[in-house]
Image (cartoon, grey):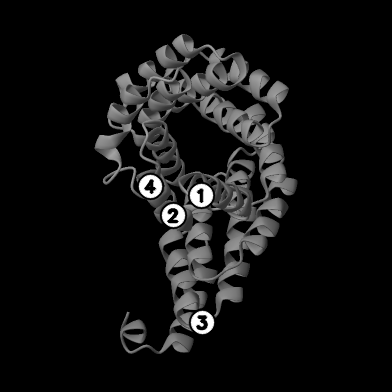
Amino acid sequence: MSLLDNKNYVGAVQKFQSSLDNAVSDPKKQLITIQTLVESNKLNQATDLLQQLLLEHPSQKIWYDVLHLLCQNELPYQKAIQLLEKVSKKNPNELLAPLYLSDFFLRDQQEKNALASLHTAVKLSDTKKLKTILWHQIAYLNFKAKKFVEFKNALKNAQEQSVDFAPLNNLIAYYYMRLEHNYDKARASVERALKFEPANPQFLDTLAYTYYKEKNYKKAYDTLQPILATTGKDDFVIQKHFAKITYQLGNAKQAISILKKALPLAQSPHYKKQTNALIKRWSNQLT
């Protein structure tokens, strides 16, 4: 380790690569080699080595996690995606490749490709719990894309696994609320989610929004207000919903103030445009 301690990275790489050639099966030495390459600004060489390891050992989770670490060291998501596509093509029956591919697609805002990878992964998954998680994610992405037939089918597939999964119960609540306008069933579903995670801010937001849709604004306010400055302070949707509740309770100035503070949290141009329009409309009503 003296070469690393003295920051003699080139010498360290040569030494570790020599060790790697003699002990290919030793993951510790492989990890050290990758680390040394990254620290000596040889990210492409580190990526090439990692690709070799993934192609040779596609069922070893550690190498997929290392790929995440390389992306934190400025490896573009697109390069990681290309690497995993090679692994998946060579090993079509290997679960981890499409599983991690879906994650990288989502990080790169390629939701259509993420859906395709998730469908591949769910076919390869061998546990009901994992199938539930994957069908939940498929349902959520279809809901975001307003593909409600696919959304409903994915929810059904998730429910057929008979696994209690709190985020799934929360998403089912959205189904009842948004598509069937059945607020009693929506509330029952999100309350089931809250039994598992009683302090989850997204679940509390869903519960509050069922009250909002029923025009029970006081109860909606009382549900969200306690988390507004804590677990919900960095959540745009929670802040926006609370502003709408506050507005309906007759405090337009405070509602506008909440929306203006929440605007930087909006992650898409659509949300920003929608929020600015709401601020403008409420402000015009005050003049």
Percent across and percent down for residue 172 are 52, 19
10 Å crowding of disc 4: few (<14), some (14-19), many (20+): some
Sequence-wise, the earlier of marks 1 and 3 is 3
Sequence-wise, the earlier of marks 4 and 2 is 4
Q: Name the residue under label 2.
A: 260
Q: Report the Cα–Cα distance between label 2 and label 3.
A: 42 Å
Q: In which quarter of the image is residue 145?
A: top right
Q: Mark 1 points at which residue?
A: 279
10 Å crowding of disc 3: few (<14), some (14-19), many (20+): few
Q: Report the Cα–Cα distance between label 4 and label 2.
A: 11 Å
SS class of the residue under badge 4? helix
10 Å crowding of disc 2: few (<14), some (14-19), many (20+): some
Name the residue: 38% across, 51% down: 257
Q: Mark 3 belongs to which amino acid?
A: Asn
Sequence-wise, the earlier of marks 4 and 1 is 4
Q: Residue 253 carries which label?
A: 4
Which of the two discs, 4 and 2, sits closer to the camera? Answer: 4
When the figure is inspected, residue 179 is found, relative to residue 253, above or below; the finding is above
